[in-house]
Amino acid sequence: ETGVTQSPTHLIKTRGQQVTLRCSSQSGHNTVSWYQQALGQGPQFIFQYYREEENGRGNFPPRFSGLQFPNYSSELNVNALELDDSALYLCASSRLAEGSYNEQFFGPGTRLTVL
Amino acid sequence: AQSVSQHNHHVILSEAASLELGCNYSYGGTVNLFWYVQYPGQHLQLLLKYFSGDPLVKGIKGFEAEFIKSKFSFNLRKPSVQWSDTAEYFCAVISSGGSYIPTFGRGTSLIVHP
């Protein structure tokens, strides 16, 4: 069973640039969630995708957007990068069933630094 | 909106000491509660969870947590810590009947000295 993988591991960008982060879900999972973890903080929910549609969103501006593909892999896109976007970005996958919660499995994260 | 407070941000213990990490949440309805652990250089992983039933739940590696509804608390405990328990610990809550999206606390850094 392949776990959740993310790429790249590290990334350095400058203010105003755009970035795309990628995630491959664990086999058999149909839901992907993205989190931002700033230094010294817990993960903050950005959004969740289920069956290729956004299924919930946290308190993040529209310049944070995402996609989920038919194979359940996902992308997180951030436009017009700001210094405060520097963080560890975590992807988590799970198998969502109606009316229940299933454990999320996290990837190793992508460390984004904005200069 | 739900929120989670972890009051101990940094804890330093010697091996064999007992551990208790505090977690309080603010939400008046039914909740599901979790503790996650992040060992150095590893992925965030689930330590234990409470959905319903016995409020004392046991997780992996000898950890347990007790849900006290009247105190809105879900404290994590371990009777005797080991050096390998050095990690970041995160408490999280999901409100039942919602979108099953967890809210995490800011985490507690535990260092265990051999």
Image (tube, coloured by chain):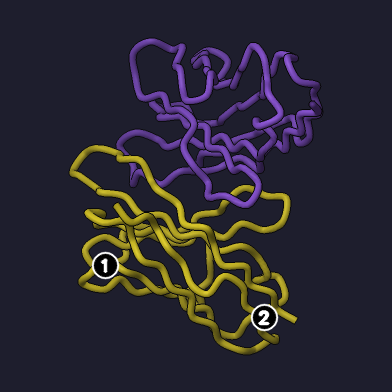
Whether pointer 2 and pointer 1 mark residues with C-beta atoms closer than 8 Å, the reply is no
Q: Position of residue B11 (x, y in %)?
A: 78, 29
Q: Position of residue B83 (x, y in %)?
A: 71, 29
Q: Looking at the colours in the rendered structure, which chain would you say is drawn in purple?
A: B
Residue that appears at 37% across and 55% down: A3
Secondary structure of the residue carrying tag 2 is strand
Residue that appears at 81% across and 28% down: B113
Q: Is residue B7 visible?
A: yes
- The residue where tag 1 is placed is A53
Q: Looking at the colours in the rendered structure, which chain would you say is drawn in yellow?
A: A
> What's the residue type where badge 1 is placed?
Glu
Q: Residues within 10 Å of mark 1 (few under 14, many from 20)?
A: few
Tell us which disc is closer to us: 2 or 1. Answer: 2
- The residue where tag 2 is placed is A12
Give the vertical position of A1 relative to B68 (above or below).
below
Marks 2 & 1 on one chain: yes
